[in-house]
Amino acid sequence: MAEGARPSVLRTGALIGAGMAGYFLDGIPGLNGVYRSAIMVAGIALLVALSVYEYIQLRRDAAQILNSEQEYMDRMAQFLDNNHHVTIVTRRGDWIKHGSTIWHRLVSRARDGRLDLFLIRRNRISDQLARMGANVFYYEHLGLEPNGGFTMLTATNLRKVAIGWWIAGRSDKRKLQIYYSADDPAVEIAFSQVQLLKNSAARHVDCD
């Protein structure tokens, strides 16, 4: 389940409405069993439709809007406050600031061989982390230009993903969605994408 999930006011209202409708329908003597069943089925279908709509809206709106890069970095530093293996799929990795808390946590992972980094092309960040021991890959030749990226934590019986992306047309705002369940579809998709990238991305070669 995504972080920030809240009970649905819409669904709660629908349940109350369905209960009231059932109460009033029960008091109509001329309503035979067929009509009652049809109304009941229609009510159940409506509740299912509302639940699906709520789920879609929750996935779309539950992500936190972050108004500054520092706020984004603080949340990601908190997400990385553990000893799990880290896999980062990003465009350039500009948010990995040298000397920041994030940087030190990634350097620690790299030295232990527990950091995989995927970027569009080679840059200073990839060179430095590769020298520290990170497994670095480039995917420029694949023609991918994502509007964001994701960071995945893995350990025994554990898989978590933080997905961040820019809000269209707003260079000062990002969204960040964190998924804590390994069974979540977003986590499974991220895991599958990493497997594909490992098979097709170009591995870092230090030319120095």
Image (cartoon, helix red, strand yellow):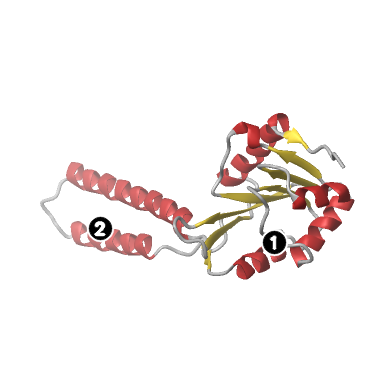
The crowd level at tag 1 (other Cα within 10 Å; few <14, some 14-19, many 20+) is some
93 or 28: nearer the viewer: 93
Q: Which residue is mark 1?
A: 79
Task: Determine whether the residue tagged by mark 2 lies in a helix, strand or loop.
Answer: helix
The answer to whether 128 is drawn above or below residue 80 in the figure is above
Residue visible at 69% across and 30% down?
200
119 or 111: nearer the viewer: 119
The answer to whether 1 is drawn above or below residue 67 in the figure is above
83 or 149: nearer the viewer: 149
Question: What is the quadrant of the N terminus in the image?
Answer: bottom right
* Left or right: 25, with 68 as reference point: left
Q: Which residue extends farthest left?
A: 30
Question: What is the quadrant of the C terminus in the image?
Answer: top right
Q: Amino acid at mark 2?
A: Gly
The answer to whether 112 is drawn above or below residue 192 in the figure is below
Q: Which residue is mark 2?
A: 22
Q: Position of residue 27 (x, y in %)?
A: 17, 60
Q: How many marks?
A: 2
Q: Are marks 2 and 1 in contact (CB under 8 Å)?
A: no
Decide if residue 155 is in sight here. Answer: no
Q: Amino acid at mark 1?
A: Phe
Task: Determine whether the residue tagged by mark 1 lies in a helix, strand or loop.
Answer: helix
84 or 156: nearer the viewer: 84
Q: Position of residue 75 (x, y in %)?
A: 65, 66
Q: Which residue extends farthest front?
A: 208
The crowd level at tag 2 (other Cα within 10 Å; few <14, some 14-19, many 20+) is some
